[in-house]
Image: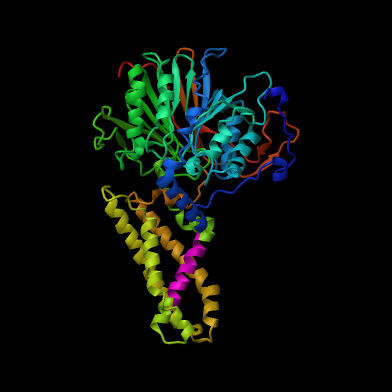
Amino acid sequence: MPEAERTVPSRPGSTDPLELGFTPKRPVGWLAPLLLLSTGLRALLAILFGAYLDKRELQNALGDEVFDHSSTADGDIWLDYVADLGDGFDATYSIAYLLAQPELEVGGERLPRGRLLLMGGDQVYPLADGDGYENRMKGPYRAALPEAPAGLPRPTLFALPGNHDWYDGLTAFLRLFARRKDGFIGGWRTEQRRSYFAVKLPQNWWLFAVDEQFGAYIDDPQLVYFEKAARAVQPDDRVILMTPSPTWVKAKDDPEAYDAVDYFIRTILAPTRAEVRVLVSGDLHHYARYTAEDRELITCGGGGAYLLGTHRLPDTLEVPPRETLTRSKSRSREYARAAIFPDAPTSKKLAWGVFHRVPRRNAGFATMLGIIHTLTMLAMAGAASQGGNIQRLFSIPLVLMLVLIMAGTVLFAKPPGASSAKHARHWILGVTHGLAQIALAAGGTWVWLQMPFRDWLWPGPLAVAAVLYGPVIGLLATQLCALYLLIASFFDVNVNELYAGQSIEDAKSFLRMHIDVDGTLTIHPLGVDTICHEWSADPAGEPHAPWLRPGTPLAAHRIEDPIVIGRSQGL
């Protein structure tokens, strides 16, 4: 609707959800039993039935505009990039607050707010639905920039879906980001009509954002859309390519992971003779840049989700990998790792925090392990001693409990297909973890049998087991699981779970980019060492001012020197 007709929300006087219009959420507890179950089931359903839920084919009926942001008053443009943002409020709003500021002073240089805000995927966690988007993404960003400043062009927001946006088949994503009317998220307007888009930028730069469904393929309507967009691309134009996942990194373990992106570059962009100078993605929750002579591969997934360590990243990548079975692949080139955030020593130090963060931030996980171990102990004790009929019942499921522990630990190790080079290590580590948990259960049973309460009248032993034994063994089992995660990470197994279980909110990152009037692209990778946890309402602020102000200092710093990309000397 016309901006004059839009209802401007009143400014809240407190952090009460009733005044904010949304509920600030705590970080997702990724090891919570119900979340593990529901997310796993949804991921499995999305993989098995994704083709039936895939709404990209239906998007052919939607508008196929190529968006033109090439004309600006000064001939240049600023762009912001953020990804993996819809998690806990404090981390998400800390980044949103910085993105919404009129400018950031970093290293003695003033960097204006982006005319375009590019969201690179996973705008909500853990599952995509209307309430999740409202509370974890839309609400915080509306609070950070309620209205566009008067007299200035309204910034535009484009969003690319990630795997978590896909878990409902893009229903909620399209409803939020691809609306034809009332397309506003706070002070940002939305323009896109599909889950993918192409944007013409000043000085012969282009932005192409491709939507891969779990990295599987690029649908025909999407290819037709980009073929149409590519007709306007001229030789020697330069392209920034957004993808949902850094498949150039994942291809190290899965050579086919990069095939769809390589196909897109070969069939859509290469015929134009344009230069693909930057590939950028989120999905991995850290900052990492790999570089070659004429191309930058950037992962920047620090918009709010839990931090993922960087010290296990390879020093070099070969892209596309020589092991791919695609016969017509592009020429393989080596990319050197240029920068990471956090740095390797910090990443290693954070990994060791698993012993205290996992039990503190995943109480439900510890409770689940306590219940499993308590039932296993009772089954072992019943099988090892004589008792009444009720106690004997606990000896019946002993084999079942052992199978449950072994199956759970092996599945937790996520063994890949038999063709994977790392297939064996996942099985070995999973089985070893299972045997260690069974050994702990056997040790707990021995201790239990030495205690006097085992001879109490029934159900006295059961009550003591539930009140005393369960919490203690649950904590010990959680520590054993933490030890497993730390050891497994040295073999590149369960690295994601090592950090997801800790829900580390600090060490966030985003990009601020500038296309100058001479066509030079400068990328400013910005990091935030410590997010803010204390917020105060600003009811007397201007309409465009953030609703909530940080109660502790919140600032961005350079992760590395600005990345300056001029015209290449030839590919």
The one nearer the camera, 417 or 19, is: 417
On the rendered image, what quadrant is the N terminus found in? top right
Magenta stretch prevailing secondary structure:
helix
How does the figure colour the protein chain or chains? Answer: rainbow
Residue segment shown in magenta: 365-378
Q: Residue at x 35, y 51 (%)?
A: 493
Residue 228, above or below 326: above
Q: Hey, which quadrant is residue 342 in on the image? A: top left
Whether residue 357 is visible to the viewer of this picture, yes or no, is yes
What x and y, as percent, mark residue 119?
51, 32
Q: Residue at x 47, y 85 (%)?
A: 389
What x and y, as percent, mark residue 371?
49, 68
Q: Residue at x 59, y 24 (%)?
A: 155
Label count reads 0
What x and y, as percent, mark residue 350?
45, 49
Whether residue 563 is visible to the viewer of this picture, yes or no, is no
Residue 438, above or below 46: below
Can residue 459 be found in the magenta stretch? no
On the rendered image, what quadrant is the C terminus found in? top left
Residue 416, above or below 256: below
The one nearer the camera, 402 or 539, is: 402
Can residue 370 be found in the magenta stretch? yes
What x and y, as percent, mark residue 284?
43, 40
Q: Hey, which quadrant is residue 49 in on the image? A: top left
